[in-house]
């Protein structure tokens, strides 16, 4: 469907995104000056071309792959880039003994289309990976982001990859899983750019750390059309990067056969990286099914990432992330923006989310959803299969949602299952702020629920922790023609929180555009703290 949100150029550069080291937002005039400078011309004259390595003589897809592989290897060895001028359209085939083509620092494909077939093995076409070495750091040093006493990290720029070898989640749903948490830190002269998503100086934590050298120089991958051939019998991924700082992926299209029957895609894989910008990327299909996963972009262990103007038409959801810290999605139309398990700070701004919304587990910090349209999904869905309910803040601002079901947020379960890690034993609900939310009520709804609980009764039996504030300033219901207004219940069934609960509700309109007449529906307050401070400016309020 067409998005109700207009992605105007004037809003693309609005404030709120993390700052990047590169000059990628400089004006086109500045760019043209830079491109025509003597230094730039000298650099381009050193770049290597596939035509220098036998491109014209290559007759088969395998031969063309070998030419590109040799060209990139030679360019990496010389510290220059590859000039794709004149390549245009090319069909590649993956040899049995093929290795991923190594990326240089600046990979501009100049609008080339690469159609790739593999009948030999699953394959990732391009890659750029750093070499990691082990390093000893303590949980306290990680929490303080202070590594000046660690000799290997005390001078220079480094990426520190941190993993907790004690599983964060031992069992996912009903099956053994062993999900481990990761944190990533950019360390400059011994001081980290950020702390972890959650503390490491705990009895349950077992730290494993690796490090690699980093650079402030921007790395790029741009201007490519990637086509997966229908005749492939093995999956082909586009790229994988690991141990990179300040990497920019832009102007990429991906086309995947819609009826491959495969799943398990990782088209673009980003691991152990910092300062990532992905923009103007479109996906026409992935290797996925409606009920089986496959991802266009998969991040694991990434700090400070921005995804801008991403579009997708996929059976599953384009994103499949874990262990992300400070992640932003802007000006995009996708199925979902998720973090499966563990992370901190998620922002979704000026987006259309179709069908799956923002499903997450174990996210600390703040989840912010603003200026978005959500179709058949929710601005927050707790992935209860990970059964971790950590404290965070939830903000929804200036959004319109047309949910499939009769609720705004999906809060997971209140069951009797107790987490095995001491840090995760308590069940926390977020503090919530809603400003100017329009809810298009489903036709068959007899009520709307603010906080939906996915099991039928409170089996937990304890007050929920962290939640101390629920604030609504502007919520309006809209109805299909002929539908009567419905009440708003705060929870599916009565819920208790620990400590004092402050509820502040104003500018609530449950009648909306309904023309059916009759009395205004109630708001039913069945959420309480051990003590309450309610300020509800709505005449038809019922407190249970």
Image (cartoon, rainbow, N blue to C red):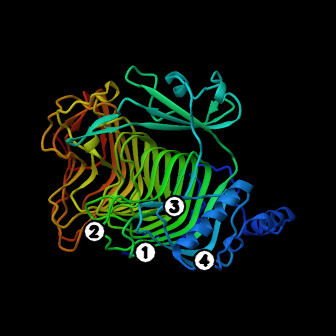
| Residue annotated with mark 3 | 98
Residue furthest to the right: 38
Q: For this view, does 339 lie left or right of residue 132?
A: left
* Res. 58 mark: 4
Quarter of the view holding residue 85: bottom right
- Residue 180, x across and y down, in percent: 38, 36
N-term-proximal mark, 2 vs 3:
3
Q: How far apart are the alpha carbons under marks 2 and 3? A: 62 Å
- Residue 301, x across and y down, in percent: 48, 43
Q: How far apart are the alpha carbons under marks 1 and 2? A: 50 Å
Is the C-beta separation of discs 1 and 4 under 8 Å?
no
Q: Residue at x 57, y 80 (%)?
A: 59
SS class, disc 2: loop
| Disc 4: CA contacts within 10 A as few (<14), some (14-19) or many (>=20) | some
Quarter of the view holding residue 354: bottom left
- Residue 385, x across and y down, in percent: 25, 44
N-term-proximal mark, 2 vs 4:
4
Nearest the eye: 445 or 517? 445
């Amino acid at each position: 469907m067409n998005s109700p949100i207009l992605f105007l150029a004037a809003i693309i550069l609005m404030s709120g995104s993390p700052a990047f080291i590169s000059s990628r937002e400089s004006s086109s005039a500045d760019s043209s000056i830079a491109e025509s400078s003597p230094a730039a011309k000298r650099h381009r004259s050193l770049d290597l071309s596939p035509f220098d390595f036998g491109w014209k003589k290559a007759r088969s897809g395998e031969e063309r792959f070998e030419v590109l592989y040799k060209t990139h290897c030679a360019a990496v060895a010389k510290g220059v880039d590859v000039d794709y001028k004149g390549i245009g359209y090319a069909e590649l085939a993956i040899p049995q003994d093929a290795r991923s083509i190594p990326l240089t620092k600046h990979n501009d494909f100049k609008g080339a289309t690469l159609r790739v077939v593999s009948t030999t093995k699953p394959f990732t076409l391009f890659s750029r990976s750093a070499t990691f070495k082990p390093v000893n750091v303590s949980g306290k040093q990680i929490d303080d982001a202070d590594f000046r006493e660690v000799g290997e990290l005390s001078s220079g720029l480094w990426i520190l990859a941190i993993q907790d070898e004690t599983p964060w989640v031992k069992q996912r749903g009903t099956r053994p899983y062993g999900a481990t948490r990761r944190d990533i830190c950019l360390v400059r002269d011994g001081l980290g750019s950020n702390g972890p998503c959650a503390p490491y100086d705990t009895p349950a934590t077992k730290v494993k750390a690796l490090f690699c050298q980093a650079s402030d120089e921007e790395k790029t991958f741009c201007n490519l059309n990637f086509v997966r051939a229908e005749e492939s019998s093995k999956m082909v991924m586009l790229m994988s990067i690991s141990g990179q700082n300040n990497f920019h992926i832009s102007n990429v299209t991906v086309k995947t056969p819609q009826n491959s029957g495969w799943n398990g895609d990782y088209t673009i894989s980003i691991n152990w990286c910092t300062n990532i910008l992905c923009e103007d990327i479109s996906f026409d299909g992935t290797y996925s099914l409606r009920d089986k996963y496959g991802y266009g972009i998969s991040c694991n262990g990434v700090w400070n990432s921005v995804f801008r103007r991403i579009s997708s038409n996929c059976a599953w959801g384009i994103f499949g992330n874990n262990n992300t810290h400070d992640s932003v999605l802007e000006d995009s139309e996708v199925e979902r923006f998720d973090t499966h398990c563990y992370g901190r700070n998620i922002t979704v701004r000026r987006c259309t989310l179709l069908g799956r919304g923002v499903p997450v587990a174990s996210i600390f910090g703040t989840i912010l959803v603003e200026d978005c349209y959500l179709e058949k999904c929710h601005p927050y869905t707790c992935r209860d299969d990970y059964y971790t309910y950590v404290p965070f803040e939830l903000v929804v601002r200036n959004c319109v949602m047309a949910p499939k079901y009769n609720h705004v947020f999906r809060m997971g379960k209140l069951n009797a299952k107790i987490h095995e890690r001491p840090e995760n034993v308590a069940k926390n609900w977020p503090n919530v702020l809603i400003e100017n939310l329009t809810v298009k009520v489903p036709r068959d709804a007899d009520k709307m629920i603010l906080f939906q609980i996915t099991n039928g009764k409170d089996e937990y039996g304890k007050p929920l922790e962290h939640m101390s504030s629920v604030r609504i300033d502007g919520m309006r219901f809209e109805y299909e023609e002929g539908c009567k207004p419905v009440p708003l219940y705060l929870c599916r069934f009565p819920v208790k929180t620990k400590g004092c609960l402050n509820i502040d509700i104003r500018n609530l309109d449950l009648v909306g555009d309904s023309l059916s007449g009759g009395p205004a529906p109630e708001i039913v307050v069945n959420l309480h703290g051990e003590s309450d401070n309610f300020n509800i400016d709505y005449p038809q309020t019922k407190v249970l």
